[in-house]
Every structure is written in C-alpha cells, then in structure tokens.
Image (tube, rainbow, N blue to C red):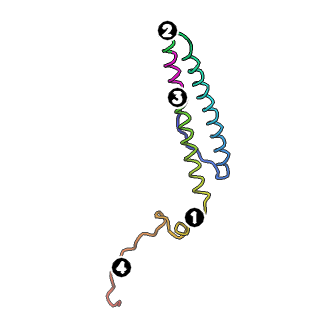
Amino acid sequence: MKVRINSSVRLEQVPDKISELFNELRKETQDLSSASHAAFNASNVQSSSPLKYKLLLDMTNEINSSLQDVVETISDINAIVGGYIKLSEPPTEEESVATPPDLEQPEQPEQPEQPGEQ
C-alpha cells in the first residue's frame, strides 16, 4: 500500500526530486514489464489445469497493482513539474500588478460627518 507524504524542499532541489521520481517510474515500469512478460509466458504453458488459470489471475492482479503504481507516480510527476513551471515563469503583467486577495486592505466604514465639518 502506498501513502501520500507531503514534504517541503527548496526550489533549487525540485529538479533533483523530479529526477528521483522519474527513476522510481523507470523501476515501476520495469516491474510492470517483467510481470506482464511472466504472465504472457505462463499463458502459453500447455495446460488446462485450473491452477494455471488461478496463477494467471494472481499475475493479472499483480500487473494491475504495478500499473496503479505507475499511474500514481506519473500523477505526482505531473503535479510537481506543473507547479515548478508556474513558479519558474515570470509573472504576467496582470499577476504582478494585482494585489493578492489575502493582502487586500479591508474596506473602511464611512465615518459619519462631525457637526461643523463640510
């Protein structure tokens, strides 16, 4: 079972983390390839035994699990690369001029006029 762990890294370390994820993806795709190759070989064994088909069912479950690992890692890579691109690109003119909503000054209520002021 995989669990998601959030961690913070310095911006300059992001390319190394992306590389680590691609290495993990490479290993996962190798596992997927090995599992599917083994299932292919098992499916070609001349036998009508129910054990053969139970084995093939187990093997397809393993392939499915490996495939899910690949999909999750690709999703992680896409999210990190997308965020890195956004941080690396210079802000557009509109973004650099606009005040972020959390920094906007609250509106001040109008003060009633004091007698004698006009």
**Other residues around mark 2 within 10 Å, as few (<14) / some (14–19) / many (≥20):** few
Choose mark 4 or mark 3, whichever is in front: 3
Residue type indicated by callout 3: Ser
Choose mark 4 or mark 1, whichever is in front: 1
The secondary element bearing badge 2 is classed as loop
Along the polypeptide, which appears first: circle 3 or circle 1?
Answer: 3
Seen at 60% across and 23% down, the residue is 37
Gap between marks 4 and 3 measured at Cα: 66 Å
Seen at 33% across and 91% down, the residue is 116
Choose mark 1 or mark 2, whichever is in front: 2
Range of the magenta residues?
Answer: 55-66
Seen at 49% across and 19% down, the residue is 57
Residue type indicated by callout 4: Gln
**Other residues around mark 1 within 10 Å, as few (<14) / some (14–19) / many (≥20):** few
Quick one: 57 or 78, which is closer to the camera?
A: 57
Residue 89 location (% of width, % of height) = 60, 60
